[in-house]
Image (cartoon, rainbow, N blue to C red):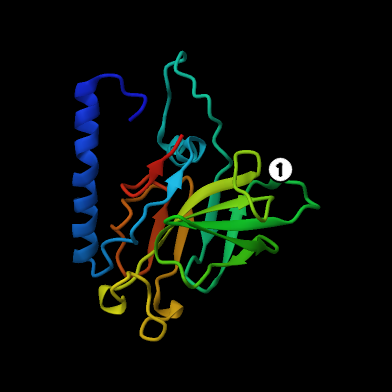
Amino acid sequence: MSNLTNTTLQTVAGSILATSARYASWAATVNGVQPWDGAFDSPLRPSQVLALMSPYVASCPQASGSPFTPSPNLTIYSGARGSNATFDFNNTSADGNSPLFAVFYQGLSTQFVPLVNHSAIIPENLSGITYAVITNSSTTVSDNTTVAGPAVLNLSVPMNGTNSTGEPPSSSTSSSAMPSSTASSSAGSSSSSMSSVTSSTVSSTPTSSATTVS
């Protein structure tokens, strides 16, 4: 939005956001899953948004170079809450002797999980749209510490298995009941709430819930 100088286009682009959010909520309800992830969306840096979008950009005018460089692609296999997931990425940018971490974004919270042999356990308290990156820091996520990602996990929660806060309950819905998925920062997909409760493939297509911060 900040790069749009035409006020007419700014109005049109801004009005689409709320409409797209309602579309996503309707589609989620039809699929029987929770239509929103919580009170807050996950803010993403421009370089992270570029990493998510770059696989879908065929070409750009030569004079419109971006000041941001996308990170290497990240693919996550068997991504269910509370399960051990495999993270596939190009490791050439990481020091082989330094520990790596899988970092999960949901809303305004960030969780760091040690990465061992390209595997890490997805925290059980996550639900809905979650972004994941690989970093070489256990406390900070920045362009300098990011090794790969982000990728998107859609950890859908059935509507009948949620409480009033939107968090998954401790007993009626276990992580084993959630769909396993493959999340990639380069595969095609739909919006944040479009996924069915059944097994699905979730990719990093930018969703209506992603917010860019500069």
- Which residue is the extreme one toward the right? 97
Looking at the picture, does residue 136 appear above or below residue 80?
Answer: above
Left or right: residue 103 compared with residue 35: right
Given the image, on which type of amino acid does mark 1 rest? Answer: Thr
Q: Quadrant of the N terminus?
A: top left
Residue 160's x, y, as percent? 26, 78
Q: Which of 42 and 191 is in front in this view?
A: 42
Left or right: residue 98 compared with residue 178: right
Residue 42's x, y, as percent? 42, 51
Looking at the picture, does residue 115 appear above or below residue 90?
Answer: below
**For residue 25, what is the image quadrant?**
bottom left
Looking at the picture, does residue 82 appear above or below residue 108?
Answer: below
Q: Mark 1 points at which residue?
A: 92
Kindly identify the residue that appears in the image at 50 percent across and 41 percent down: 48
**For residue 9, what is the image quadrant?**
top left
Left or right: residue 173 compared with residue 115: left
- Count of marks placed on residues: 1
Kindly identify the residue that appears in the image at 64 percent across and 46 percent down: 90
- Which residue is the extreme one toward the top? 63
**For residue 199, what is the image quadrant?**
bottom left
Circle 1 residues within 10 Å: few <14, some 14–19, many ≥20: few
Secondary structure of the residue carrying numbered label 1? helix
Q: Nearer the viewer, residue 19 or 80?
A: 19
Q: Nearer the viewer, residue 28 or 123?
A: 123
Residue 59's x, y, as percent? 43, 24
Kindly identify the residue that appears in the image at 37 percent across and 52 percent down: 41
Residue 138's x, y, as percent? 67, 56
